[in-house]
Image (cartoon, rainbow, N blue to C red):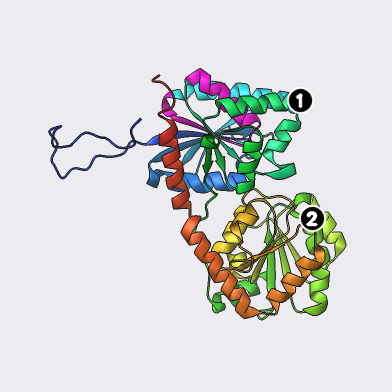
Amino acid sequence: MQDTLSQNPVSQGMPAHVETVSPMVRVAMLIQSYHPWIGGAERQVEALCSVFPHQGIEALVITRRRPEPGYTPFEIIAGAPVYRIRIFGGYALRSLSFTAGALWQLWKLRRQIDVLHAHDTLSPTTTALLAKFLIRRPVVVKVLTSGSLGDIAVLRAKRFGRARMALLARFVDRFICISDEIANDLTAAGVALDKLARIPNGVDTIAYAPTDEADRQRMRQQVGVPAEAPVAIFTGRLIPKKGLRDLAAAWASVVEQQPNAHLLIVGTGPEAEVLQAMSAPNVHLLGARQDIPDLLRASDIFVLPSQAEGLSNALLEAMASGLACVGSDVGGTRDLLQHERNGVLVPYGDQPALARELIRLISNSHLRRALGSAARQTIERDYSLESVAQRLRALYTDIMDIMPPR
């Protein structure tokens, strides 16, 4: 399929000043969960759906319908139709019921779909590959995480996992890699280099942006943090692989040397009770919040001590907000942060190193501002939502030529 109409408008009897219009690319996003469940992948899909029309893309979302309140069969979110597939039974039956229901929905919507875009290598990809042969549409798979806890490792550890990976390597048309480590995982699993597309996550550079000191102090008053206190922040799911126990232990050392420093932890998850029990000083557990941009503007430092990351949306948002960022030297964090240039990297699990770097940034406002400014420049250059949507549009139109005429 051609991305633009190739005919000369004059030769077609059209006025010479009339511009031809690129056809819309219609994409079905398949994802395990979606609103009201919120995680990094879900937030990224929603953010992209909001800017896709400006890049000539129409998206729809197919996801699971959970039993909790708020999961209606159909809804429009960020301008995109969302179809929730009813699931039931145990783990295997839930996957099977999602795949069967999603295939039926894709068949009904087939005339509204040009490309199938799966998020993660499990049920969404299985469904997309079956739909590829049912409705004859090309398949893109976005791999979300890397390393020993990543998508490829999890898939290969499952029953028949290596055989499934071989099928993916053969029949998926393109894999989206959001980090170098994910690309390495895929090539090690037998995926050809020409099937890899290096497209990162994107961030809204208007919603997430630096602020002035007066606004920062106003935000701190709302949170209940002293206006002049150094403030570090973590945002994300409170789960073990985020390294929050290491952060709490390191923070106790930080406060010994910087007793006026405060730490905001934003999010929900099973580690909340553990963090509460650790009772680290000057730590504020804020739970789920809708005002993340304001909380980032109220802060000086962002910290992400994770064991594994694909490409953290929370880190992208903090960098866009102009914060000095400290992250574990893993996965996509390593791709985003260049040590001492636009952020700071520490070895995962090294509590003394984490404490040491936090203390250094807390005590050096000039260094914080320099790293925060460089972080913002990195985002503006390479990670805006608009630039990511443009690259996805180019990828979609490229693989639409792969499938034979239908």
Q: Is residue 23 above or below residue 288?
A: above
Quadrant of the rendered image containing residue 45: top right
Determine crowd level at label 1: few under 14, some 14-19, many 20+ residues with C-alpha closer than 10 A.
few
The quarter of the picture where the C terminus appears is: top left
Q: CA distance from mark 2 to mark 1?
A: 33 Å
Residue placed most toward the observer, 319 or 147: 147
The mark nearer the N terminus, 2 or 1, is 1
Q: Which residue is mark 1?
A: 159
Q: Is residue 116 magenta?
A: yes
- Residue 272, numbered label: 2
Q: Is residue 146 above or below residue 293?
A: above
Q: For marks 2 and 1, give the one nearer the viewer.
A: 1
Residue in the picture at 61% in, 72% down: 219
- Residue 359, numbered label: none
Q: Amino acid at mark 2?
A: Ala
Determine crowd level at label 2: few under 14, some 14-19, many 20+ residues with C-alpha closer than 10 A.
many
- Which residues make up the magenta segment? 111-135
Q: Residue 69 location, x and y as percent?
A: 66, 39
Q: Is residue 385 above or below residue 259?
A: above
The quarter of the picture where the N terminus appears is: top left
